[in-house]
Image (cartoon, helix red, strand yellow):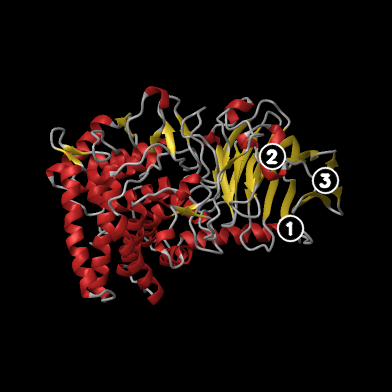
């Protein structure tokens, strides 16, 4: 097995979860990230952003020469890691059961061959690696307490309890097995550890297989499509229906750099991407749950919309740093919360209106509450559409009138007019104003957002640079794919932002080098397909698949120079974009803006 530094690469992790929280499991058998009891709770294992001092839960052979093979049990989120040594081999099966009252993580160790010596170490550190627990022995294991959190660890082998962690050293011969069950409870609660672990394993497998079994679409990449959809389902919070952007914080967009953000929130910007993927894949129940989550989160005051919300729809996403964590490979600061929630981003109003109209076209009934929300959003958008903002990439520098943001303002008005025409929930004077405004915005963008000398749309007014978000212009119906201005923009993205088959989201000075943004390459595949460049669209999809890890998981970005995944992981937007690109290659589907 390679050294610790290599083991901590992002691509060496797999995801397990129960649609309430999630854990990252390394190839070396160590769980290095787990937030309990929710996705956005404090981490009790945070070695991912630090080192052994910050909490982990490992099971691995004692041998220093180990070959590792891992896979998901077919069509599940049950992770199987096989360790092969000179003396024997074992399989570690990791999963989080879906229906237990208390959040629970189960690790089953089965000897496949020979005789293997193993070590288990459970080293919780609550509050993102800051606080060691008080440990007490219990009837079948131990209890670990700190503040409002308590973990209960039960094992089928004897545990050693030391001052600040639990461990076990044990030997398994072919056919033998061991189990470790970790559960979370709050103050004055007691986690009831389930006894029938095989029953839980089978029930969890059945849950995932029955869910993905609803997928009826055919495609040329069925395994990738199913894995992406299963990953997205794992990131949909079962109690609320909200979609998490990623289960991690502060995995750097720029390796070893400061661009480290908390993505454990639900972004309004992902609204239509999410609905399109779920609806076209046939998951209408989850699509309606997401639409309903949006309506609950918005309340009744569109002027107070935020770019993102907590997974339950809450608004408290205040940003602060964890100075005791040294960061992923030294990338600091480590952040909790996200100040981008408070930015002015014009495009989100259009995204929500686009999502509402798409949902109604798909047969998801809109309520009176929903219609009033749409009216409130479009009236507010009417008053602020031309103001500068921070844009789709959430710049923390100066504000601009970004072309994509202006286009999405146009989209919002266009979709509202389509919905009002279909369902009649707006009056004539408002509709007349909006029709005139739609034409005005379109004309302004074509005049101020297009550089005729360069033959392409630009990132923002008064600018000249191209931006990968402009690939979305034909996808949202702003101009047809065969318009010369769109063709020139796609060509400019390919000329200036395409590197080694992957698309950067914008141009960067060398000192600010970031990874290629995986979703943008999927958008390029969509554009190429619409242009009739089918083989090139396929190549773009296959390039994205090539940068996923061995389990089919994608991060936010891929560093071409280091050949490493970077950014938070796994990233919902990357998987959403891949699902949409793959389904687009399959044939007719529900499109943004009609069709």
Label 1, label 2: how far apart the Cα atoms are: 18 Å
Quarter placement of the C terminus: bottom left
Q: Are marks 1 and 3 in contact (CB under 8 Å)?
A: no
| 11 with respect to 527 (left or right) | right
- Where is 304 relative to 511, above or below? below
Say which quarter of the image contains residue 58. Answer: top right
Residue 582 in the image, given as x and y percentages of width and height: 33, 49
Residue 377 in the image, given as x and y percentages of width and height: 35, 63
Pointer 2 local density, CA inside 10 Å: few below 14, some 14–19, many at least 20:
many
Give the mark nearest the N terminus, 1 or 3: 3
Give the mark nearest the N terminus, 1 or 2: 2
- Where is 254 relative to 275, above or below? above
| 82 with respect to 481 (left or right) | right
Name the residue tied to disc 2.
129
- Please give the label number shown on residue 541: none
Residue 164 in the image, given as x and y percentages of width and height: 81, 39
Pointer 1 local density, CA inside 10 Å: few below 14, some 14–19, many at least 20:
some
Count the numbered circles shown: 3
- Please give the label number shown on residue 134: 3
Residue 216 visible in the shown view: yes
Name the residue tied to disc 1.
186
Front position in the image: 471 or 518: 471
Label 2, label 3: how far apart the Cα atoms are: 14 Å
| 168 with respect to 211 (left or right) | right
- Where is 364 relative to 189, above or below? below
- Residue at image position (35%, 44%) is 391
Give the mark nearest the N terminus, 2 or 3: 2
């Amino acid at each position: 097995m390679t050294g610790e530094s290599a083991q901590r690469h992002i691509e060496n992790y797999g995801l397990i979860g129960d649609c309430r929280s999630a854990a990252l499991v390394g190839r070396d058998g160590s769980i290095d990230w787990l937030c309990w009891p929710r996705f956005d709770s404090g981490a009790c294992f945070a070695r991912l952003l630090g080192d052994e001092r910050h909490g982990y839960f490992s099971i691995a052979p004692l041998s220093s020469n180990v070959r590792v093979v891992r896979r998901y049990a077919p069509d599940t989120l049950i992770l199987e890691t096989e360790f092969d040594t000179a003396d024997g081999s074992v399989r570690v099966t990791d999963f989080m059961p879906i229906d237990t009252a208390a959040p629970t993580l189960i690790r089953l160790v089965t000897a496949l061959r020979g005789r293997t010596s193993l070590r288990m170490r459970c080293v919780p550190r609550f509050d993102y690696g800051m606080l060691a627990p008080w440990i007490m022995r219990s009837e079948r294991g131990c209890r670990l307490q700190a503040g409002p959190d308590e973990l209960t660890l039960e094992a089928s082998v004897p545990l050693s309890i030391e001052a600040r962690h639990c461990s076990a050293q044990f030997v398994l011969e072919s056919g033998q097995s061991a189990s470790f069950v970790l559960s979370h409870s709050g103050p004055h609660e007691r986690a009831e550890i389930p006894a029938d672990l095989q029953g839980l394993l089978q029930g969890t497998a059945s849950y995932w297989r029955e869910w993905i079994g609803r997928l009826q679409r055919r495609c040329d990449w069925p395994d990738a499509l199913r894995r992406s959809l299963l990953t997205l389902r794992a990131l949909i919070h079962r109690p609320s229906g909200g979609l998490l952007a990623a289960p991690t914080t502060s995995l750097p967009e720029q390796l070893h750099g400061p661009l480290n953000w908390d993505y454990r929130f639900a972004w309004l910007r992902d609204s239509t991407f999410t609905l399109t993927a779920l609806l076209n894949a046939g998951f209408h129940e989850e699509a309606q749950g997401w639409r309903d989550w949006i309506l609950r989160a918005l309340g009744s005051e569109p002027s107070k919309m935020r770019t993102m919300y907590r997974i339950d729809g809450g608004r408290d996403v205040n940003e602060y740093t964890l100075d005791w964590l040294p960061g992923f490979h030294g990338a600091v600061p480590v952040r909790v919360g996200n100040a981008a929630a408070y930015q002015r981003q014009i495009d989100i109003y259009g995204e929500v209106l686009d999502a509402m109209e798409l949902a109604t076209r798909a047969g998801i009934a809109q309520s009176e509450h929903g219609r009033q929300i749409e009216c409130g959003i479009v009236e507010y958008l009417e008053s602020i559409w031309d103001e500068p903002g921070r844009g789709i990439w959430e710049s923390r520098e100066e504000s601009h009138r970004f072309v994509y943001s202006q286009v999405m303002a146009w989209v919002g008005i266009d979709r509202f007019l389509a919905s009002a025409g279909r369902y009649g929930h707006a009056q004539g004077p408002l509709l007349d104003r909006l029709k005139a405004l739609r034409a005005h915005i379109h004309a302004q963008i074509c005049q101020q957002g297009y550089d005729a000398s360069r033959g392409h749309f630009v990132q923002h007014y008064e600018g000249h640079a191209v931006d990968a978000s402009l690939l979305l212009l034909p996808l949202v119906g702003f101009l047809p794919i065969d318009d010369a201005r769109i063709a020139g923009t796609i060509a400019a993205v390919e000329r200036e932002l395409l590197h080694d088959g992957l698309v950067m989201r914008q141009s960067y000075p060398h000192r600010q080098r970031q990874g290629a943004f995986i979703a943008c390459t999927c958008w390029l595949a969509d554009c190429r397909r619409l242009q009739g460049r089918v083989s090139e669209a396929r190549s773009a999809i296959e390039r994205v698949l090539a940068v996923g890890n061995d389990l089919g998981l994608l991060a936010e970005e891929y560093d071409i120079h280091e050949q490493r995944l970077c950014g938070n992981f796994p990233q919902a937007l990357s998987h959403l974009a891949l699902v949409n690109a793959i389904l687009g290659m399959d044939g007719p589907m529900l499109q943004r803006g009609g069709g």
